[in-house]
Image: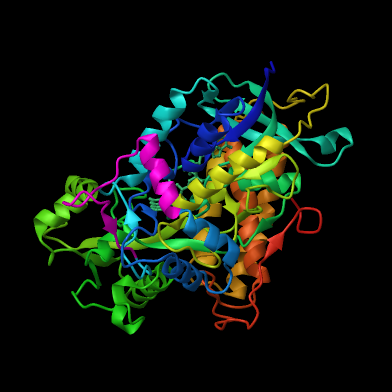
Amino acid sequence: MTEALDTDYLVIGSGIAGLNFALLAAEHGRVVVVTKKKPADTNTNWAQGGVAAVLAPDDSVDLHIQDTLTAGDGLCDRAVVEMCVSEGAAQVQRLLDVGVRLARDPAGALDLGREGAHSRNRVVHWQDVTGREIQRALIAAVTAHANITVLEDHIAVDLLSMAKYGGDPACFGAYVLDTSSGNVKTICARATVLATGGTGKVYVYTSNPDVATGDGIAMAYRLGAAVCDLEFVQFHPTVLFHPHARNFLLSEAMRGEGGVLRLANGDTFMEHYHPMKSLASRDIVARAIDNEIKKSGADSVFLDMTHLDPAFVRGRFPNIHERCLGLGIDITKQPIPVVPAAHYMCGGIKTDMRGATTISGLYAIGECAFTGLHGANRLASNSLLEGMVYSTHAAEAVRDAVRHRPSQVAPWSTGDATDSQDQIVVALNWEEIRRFMWSYLGIVRSDKRIERARRRIEILRDEIREYYIDFKVTSDLIELRNLALVAHLVIESARRRKESRGLHYTLDYPDKLPEARHSELQLTNGPRG
Ligand SMILES: Cc1cc2nc3c(=O)[nH]c(=O)nc-3n(C[C@H](O)[C@H](O)[C@H](O)COP(=O)(O)OP(=O)(O)OC[C@H]3O[C@@H](n4cnc5c(N)ncnc54)[C@H](O)[C@@H]3O)c2cc1C
């Protein structure tokens, strides 16, 4: 059975970008937000550090711009950086207006944390659970808005395009699987907004929650949208290493507040890699840890907070303190075992400064988008800011979106597909992709490793394609298909970059080329979709 819905704006994703867009766009149109699990199942909900903005008397827009450009290693778009950084203070005010609580100092001013590669204190936060607080406030505001409908447990399968009807490939909505009923709905809209977040699950070790399978990037690419710079995967240096804790991140702010990285024997090592030691940028710290672990064969290195005032540590990092205590680690008394893990996708669906993709009617905002802000390496706490800035601009841009839908829209057809008897195929392929991506497209790459990954992903994608045709869609199958395509795109992007820059480090080309170039892929002139 196919149910058809019609709205002004279809938003896919309920993180900071999707929900802030929904709130703003609902002032001039009807909004449907679909989200594949519960509304708070997002990367946003897990953000610990906070939002970067120029608010301190000793800070300036120029300094924040400079820090962003330095981290981005020659690939940032300066106009985009200037736009995002200049809007920082206004976006923090917007968060307060929506009802987000932010920590204050004893004098009542916003408390500003310091994070790696920032030259000033400029990160507003709510304890160490800033993302959870933002998510809470946005969900409350969206739920109260009469113009917004949220459909949870609804996963977008593919985008609807006029190309199928002989027109240009304008987008007019999406097929969406209601995972509780098994029905695929047709949702048509004047503008379709991808706010589907990150791609961390492409790797076996990640700080991201299960929803981060790169669905938006895969759907946009299949439709013919340009994607850009997908080789720039940021690995967070410090994720807890513990058999009973999955994906638990130890915020960069812990090093910002004085935490020190050590080997198992207590020696420090970051002084051998960078003058900023434990506060060097993420890529440098992650590579240093990776190198030390490979050199010694140890399972992890350690983040040491034991020299800091225990009351301060408990007060500043209550969530981390409690979580680690539950696992038998008192962070005020014991160093914490840590490893790097895939954390943030700097590349994504190419957009202009208003969030418009290269496909008419289709917008992309938040982590799934490539705007030019992050370049080859994201500066910590710039991504929540980017989500706010671009959701604001896109909510203005969609006012001009024209309706593209044809008079009759083909309903979802299952053809001869049957229910799968073989779920194990999905589980095994999923596991295999994530493991070889970690080994071959991880922190340190080489031509040989990339080529090995390329051969494997092509075999697996053929298998997944057959499976997709033969069996009825399920959320696992949709995610596996997308994950495999994103893995393929990361591999193809990495294959094209014959240099080491920012987060892309390859043993075969350790130096940077004189000219900084983006690696853009598009189905029409790029690799197979
Ligand atoms: C542990 C952790 C800590 C972080 N800390 C910080 C920080 O301190 N500061 C900072 O700036 N950034 C931080 N980040 C990064 C930041 O949280 C994310 O980049 C940002 O929240 C992304 O927001 P988003 O709205 O783009 O996507 P998300 O918040 O990830 O939301 C994506 C949404 O899309 C939905 N979705 C995906 N695919 C589909 C589909 N096919 N159909 C329907 N729905 C779909 C998901 O279910 C989810 O609702 C952190 C990230 C992590 C994981």
Q: In this view, does 351 lie to the left or right of 383?
A: right
| Any part of residue 328 in sight | no
The answer to which of 441 and 186 lies nearer the viewer is 186
On screen, residue 183 above or below 141: above
Residue 108 falls within the magenta-colored stretch: yes
Q: In this view, does 245 lie to the left or right of 229?
A: left
Tag count in the figure? 0
x, y (%) of residue 86?
48, 58
On screen, residue 461 above or below 426: below
x, y (%) of residue 6?
68, 22
Q: Which residue is drawn at 10% across and 57% down?
A: 310
Q: Which residue is drawn at 69% across and 29% down?
A: 189
Q: In this view, does 337 lie to the left or right of 442?
A: left
Image quadrant holding the N terminus, namely top right
The answer to which of 493 and 429 lies nearer the viewer is 493
On screen, residue 419 above or below 277: above
The answer to which of 42 and 464 lies nearer the viewer is 42
Q: Residue at x 71, y 43 (%)?
A: 465
Highlighted magenta segment, given as a residue range: 88-115
User: In the rendered image, which quarter is residue 177 located in?
Assistant: top right
User: In the rendered image, which quarter is residue 453 located in?
Assistant: bottom right
x, y (%) of residue 529?
74, 50
